[in-house]
Image (spheres, coloured by chain):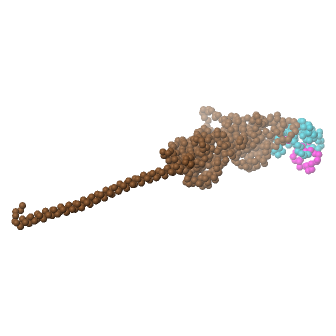
Amino acid sequence: MTKTKKAQRPPLDTLPKCPTGIKGLDEVTGGGLPQGRPTLVCGNAGCGKTVLGMEFLVRGSTEYEEPGVFMSFEETEDDLIKNFTPIGFDLPALIERKKIALDYVFVDRGAIEETGEYDLEGLFIRLAFAIDQVGAKRVVLDTIESLFSGLSNEGILRAELRRLFRWLKEKGVTALITAEQGRDTLTRHGLEEYVADCVIALDHRVIDQISTRRLRVIKYRGSVHGADEHPFLIQPTGISLLPITSLNMDHTAPTDRVSTGIERLDTMLGGKGYYRGSAILVSGSAGTGKTSVGAHFVDSACRNGHRAVFLAFEESPSQIVRNMRSIGIDLDPWEQKELLRFHAIRPTRYGLESHLARIHILIDDFKPAVVVIDPVSNLVSIGSISDVKLMLTRLMDFLKTYEITTLCTDLTAGGTSAQQTEIGLSSLMDTWILLRSLESDGERNRTMYIAKSRGIAHSDQVREFLLTDNGVELVDVYLGTAGVLTGSARAAREALDTAQELARRNELERKQRELERKRTSLKAQLATLKAEFEAEEEELQQAIDQEVGREKALDYDQRKMARLRRADET
Amino acid sequence: MGGRERGPADECNDETPDEGVWNLRLYVAGQTAKSIKAFANLKKICEEHLAGKYTIEVIDLSANPRLAKGDQILALPTLVRKLPPPLRKIIGDLSNSERVLVGLDLRPRP
């Protein structure tokens, strides 16, 4: 490496970090845990400390070539192996390959006679041995506070703990220490005094019968870190932290378009459909056909070879497929070809953050181009409106970063103004399609119009929205003097129109026929006149001929007489 | 250090443990002030209360770290009464004789 001539300012964050490999945690901590230093992980019972510790080690050994030692004060080695098999950590294999060493330290909770001066050198010896056995670079002590219940001389204990953490630092291992959360203090026995470089708190709360897990970086000396709570899940593959989505709104805006699946709707949207990567809201009261619009979109996407995810919060996938088949959309083949994946779950099953985390995982895994969320309004049953809006903001941001075109359906209460969605979602969306049902003359008809579509010159006209055997069809509404007519009123009006048209045409034909007749009559008259004329002409001609003949005859006679009389030729 | 020290090799010489013979193990971490003191204290107590019917084994964990895990030793020095059963554990340099005797069940618990 060549040295630069000018002395450069070192980057602000020069603390070396140890990447954990845990999904989302490295992002939240800005690279991982402090390298070669101890990190404290505290939390109440069952919050996931042991899982975090073990995953830190397992990923360290499998992904970062850093073997580790797990010193457990609560569970035996066998229990640990058993507990982590469902998470997919093959501990026996790792132990055999000398990637991980497990050590269960039994702390006698009964009174051990303390007969004088002692220290915890035994612990050090064991730890040193285990570290040397595998060449460990990572160590987890879970939970070292158990020592407090086994040994009564706190003075010695605290002195030894201080020594332990110094020793760990000297050894150069990145240590993760777990502790129970205290009532007033961070940890029950005040371990935060000794482990002050980095403190992470885990929380496992149950709110309204729904449990959520959260992680928060309380302290990270020498590093800039986010101080927010991050929800996480413990999945069959380990811990999954919800990453901080770019609420910076710095995602790019694609300019190409995708078809809506409904031809007339494409036309209404400037001729081409939605912008790719945009967010579409389809709102309407019950039974207006929102899911159908979503299904058309999915169908069109899959037809073009793109993957789609259908998040169903109300109906089961088979129900949706069946219902859509009744209007001529068959989603089953796409599901078979793995182009379409359904994710159906009742909102009340998990908390909002869990939903968000699960959706993240699904999308990261399946990588769709299109996502339909049907309906989005159901989520208010598991959180306040502002919570839901926040969760959806994060979700939409996440989806936009990946340029996924999203269609959300929103059930609005029938009575309220159509322009007001229950959660004020429309500001998050780029295109807003409103479905309304109009009641008139004992009949209910559906109409649709585009309330807004950012960046597209969309049609402002209301169309009648029909669910036919061939899917959704958009029909022009009747704009007459009586106002907008839909449904059978329109049909009636159209029939009337057709009848009037027919009548007019008939009238026209009649007039034409009359003209024709007159012409014919005129022609006939002319013919008669002509005939008469010809007859007369003939007569006259005959008379003329006779006259001429007589004259000729007379002339001949005269001449003959003259000849006979031998008169002079005159 | 005086007295007979038993190494692990001596274990196999025991065929039938005598009912009265006490089998004591002292875990230390090398020759430190604490370990020397503990051994001295132990000898004294044994001579006083178990004369003739005891054996002391000294295990140096810094030489045999594997045993620390196997025998679940945390604090050092630790004295373990292996025989007669039940197993008893005492930690410390054994300077508090009263406590040692109570811990070894040589004196009833107050």
Total marks shown come to 0
Look at the image and tell me whether residue B84 can be seen.
yes
Q: Which residues are magenta?
A: B2-29
Left or right placement of residue A11 versus residue A537 in this view: right
Between A388 and A174, the residue placed more toward the observer is A388
Q: Residue at x 72, y 35 (%)?
A: A197
Q: Residue at x 68, y 43 (%)?
A: A351
Q: Is residue B9 magenta?
A: yes
Quarter holding the C terminus of chain A is bottom left
Give the colour in which the image draws chain B: cyan
The chain coloured brown in the image: A
Q: Is residue A555 magenta?
A: no
Q: Residue at x 76, y 39 (%)?
A: A180
Res. A566 image quadrant:
bottom left
Left or right placement of residue A93 versus residue A526 in this view: right
Residue A27 in the image: x percent, y percent?
66, 40
Res. B78 image quadrant:
top right
Residue B42 in the image: x percent, y percent?
90, 39
Between A467 and A237, the residue placed more toward the observer is A467
Q: Point out the residue furthest to the bottom here.
A: A564
Between A198 and A260, the residue placed more toward the observer is A260
Residue A338 in the image: x percent, y percent?
61, 53
Res. A145 image quadrant:
top right
Q: Residue at x 47, y 50 (%)?
A: A497
Quarter holding the N terminus of chain A is top right
